[in-house]
Image (tube, coloured by chain):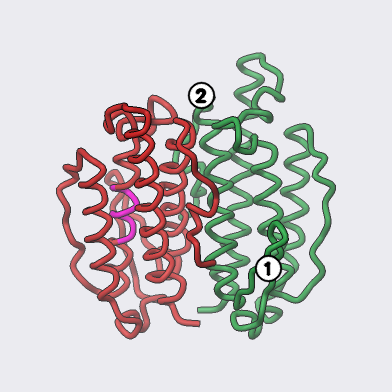
Chain colours: A green, B red
Amino acid sequence: MHLYDVSIAPLLRNLQNLKHILQQGELYAEQKKVAPEVLLNSRLSVDMYPLTNQVQLVSDMSKGAGARLAGLAIPQYADDETSFAMLYARIDKTVDFLAQIQPEQLAGAESKQVVLTIRKAELSFTGLDYLEKWVMPNVYFHSTTAYNILRHLGVPLGKTDYLGQKR
Amino acid sequence: MHLYDVSIAPLLRNLQNLKHILQQGELYAEQKKVAPEVLLNSRLSVDMYPLTNQVQLVSDMSKGAGARLAGLAIPQYADDETSFAMLYARIDKTVDFLAQIQPEQLAGAESKQVVLTIRKAELSFTGLDYLEKWVMPNVYFHSTTAYNILRHLGVPLGKTDYLGQKR
């Protein structure tokens, strides 16, 4: 078992599945003849993030993990997406960034120190704790919430869309 | 890095966080003077599982993973929970089962064959693929959906409730 198999590999799969889920949402908006923004701005509760932000957060968590574990600069994106097409592009560039990381770039990353600043508080992790206590729960949280927002709106989706075809 | 750190350890944390989330839901029902069943039977879409089943599925996925990876019999539970107290007991016995698994019982589990039968179709995985392509995405999916059902109903919850206090 290599750190890559429990970090970059599942992050890449999840991003690709998220893109597929969003594509079903875009198709549904077309079929229902509603503006895509109706879906993109939907949220499950007034103080939860809408669909667009859920996707941005999956991207942020994924590129942050790849960069920190591989010792690379974190790519900065503008968070200016206002359409499905722009969200696909955001996912694609996150995938491209992660896909260039090779397993050997993660050598020793499980025990390196990772410090996050969250609302002015510092969180210090080992690389492995950062991955298991922060990145993966967060990534699946925001992907599932994107899925749940679309399901709540009536988009026909099933678990296979979330997990991906190749199990 | 040991397989335990990316399987049993995060599964245990997630179950404990899920119990905490449910406790906030039970408290909210009391404060709002509504029957707990209103929450337990809530779902985000007519063809999604309600809260009770989401919790059962987290339990099923977690005990199945522990048992299959450690080579133990999978504990069988009756799926008869009808109250928050019964769901807590379900979570507690799942935690007790996983907590008795020692890291050395997982030796070689990443490459053993795991075969699941899902709706009459057989899915064959290596132990590591079973964990990364099936168990973890599913466990976080159902925990997040439990969280989202409660958030949608107005229960005051934040990301820290989902991630747990100790990051």
- Residue indicated by mark 2: A154
Residue B108 vertical placement versus B74 (above, below): below
Query: In which quadrant is the C terminus of chain B drawn?
Result: bottom right
The chain that hosts pointer 2 is: A
Whether residue B162 is visible: yes
Q: Position of residue A25 (x, y in %)?
A: 61, 30
> Disc 1 is attached to a residue of which chain?
A
Residue B61 locus on image (x, y percent): 33, 56
Residue drawn at x 73%, y 42% as measured from the top left: A88
Residue B48 horizontal side relative to residue A72, left or right: left
Type of the residue with mark 2: Gly
Mark toward the start of the polypeptide (1 vs 2): 1
Q: How many marks?
A: 2
Question: Is residue B57 inside the magenta stretch?
Answer: yes
Compared to B53, does A155 lie above or below?
Answer: above
Q: Residues in magenta?
A: B56-62
Q: What residue type is disc 1 on?
A: Glu
In this rendering, position of residue A81 left or right of residue B52: right
Per the picture, the main secondary structure of the magenta-coloured stretch is helix
Q: Is residue A18 magenta?
A: no
Residue in view at x 68 percent, y 29 percent: A41
Query: Is label 1 in a helix, a strand or a loop?
Result: strand
- Disc 1 marks which residue? A122
Q: Secondary structure at mark 2?
A: loop
Label 1 Cα neighbours within 10 Å, binned few <14 / some 14-19 / many ≥20? few
Looking at the image, which is closer to me, B160 or B3?
Answer: B160
Residue for point 71% across, 64% down: A117
